[in-house]
Amino acid sequence: MSGIRTVIVDDMGPARAKLRRYLAEDSRVTVVGEAASCRQAALLIAELRPQIAFLDIHLPDGSGIDLLDRAGPASPVGILVTAFDQYALRAFEMDARDYLLKPFARERFRLALNRAIEQLPHQAATRDLGKGRQYLRQMSFKDKSGRWFIDLNEVDVITADDHYLSVRRGGRVHLIRGSIRALQSELDPDAFMRIHRSILVRIASIRALHRRRCGDYAIELKDGSTAPVSRRYHEAIRACFRLRSL
């Protein structure tokens, strides 16, 4: 079985059938499973590791938004599907790629699918070598005088800025077109970690972890700047520094 692994999560049979029919028209994707509840979907995602998931927001035992939240950094690219538009803001806060409002037309579906596929890591960007995986070591940007290269060992923090990445090194900021999800898949997880849906930091640049009054946390970097840590990534922080608690 080939193609981009995709799952459909919806408690309504006709809704699943419509998505399955539209997906069958695109040779880039393969539907590897379907679920009608959060519990079924969580097991499906853990077992099949889909790259894209179409998720209904209202499910009998929870929400597609909660599924994305619990899956953490390893979650598939999510496209949330619902008849209610009031959840759009929270959907994007959970890093959903798009938000399909029922009933949706075929063209709107195709736009959402294309956006999701664009967020997947490029297969040619990294490759497996005999001694292990080769991760991205440099990024580049272009200006009027030519193309410049950035050594990732010099980068402190990378922030998503719409369709661009704001890359900060040594107090200077460079804008590079790309997505934070796709970039994260190309970076060495022992060198960079995601602490927020829109922020990647170089682990060696972290100087301290501070608790804020609201119960959230922020990291302090060696240059004195700070960045918020989303609750979604608390476990990643604990694992990285082998902490029992934050």
Image (cartoon, grey):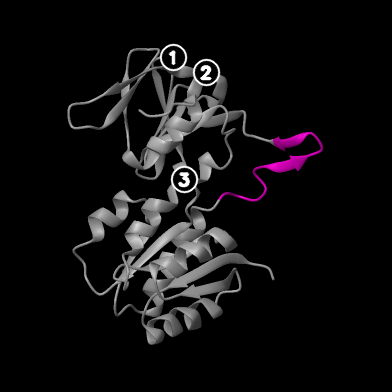
Residue at image position (49%, 52%) is: 119
Q: Secondary structure at mark 3?
A: helix
Q: Relative to 33, does residue 202 appear above or below in the rendering? A: above
State the residue position of label 3: 73
Q: Residues within 10 Å of mark 1 (few under 14, many from 20)?
A: few
Crowdedness near tag 3: few (<14), some (14–19) or many (≥20) residues, C-alpha within 10 Å: some
- The x and y percentages for residue 26 are 56, 74
Residue matched to label 2: 154
Report the Cα–Cα distance between label 2 and label 1: 7 Å
Amino acid type at mark 2: Glu
User: Of tags 3 and 2, which is closer to the observer?
Assistant: 3
Viewer-closest of 90 and 170? 90
Q: Residue at x 32, y 39 (%)?
A: 231
Residue located at (43% from left, 47% from top): 72
Query: Quadrant where the C terminus lies?
Result: top left
Q: Earlier in the sequence, mark 3 or mark 2?
A: 3
Disc 1, SS: loop
Circle 3/circle 1 CB separation < 8 Å: no
Per the picture, the main secondary structure of the magenta-coloured stretch is loop
Q: Position of residue 101 (x, y in %)?
A: 28, 72
Residue 222 drawn at (x, y percent): 40, 12
Look at mark 1 in the image and give the residue it sits on.
170
Task: Name the amino acid, label 3.
Answer: Pro
In the image, the segment drawn in magenta is 121-133
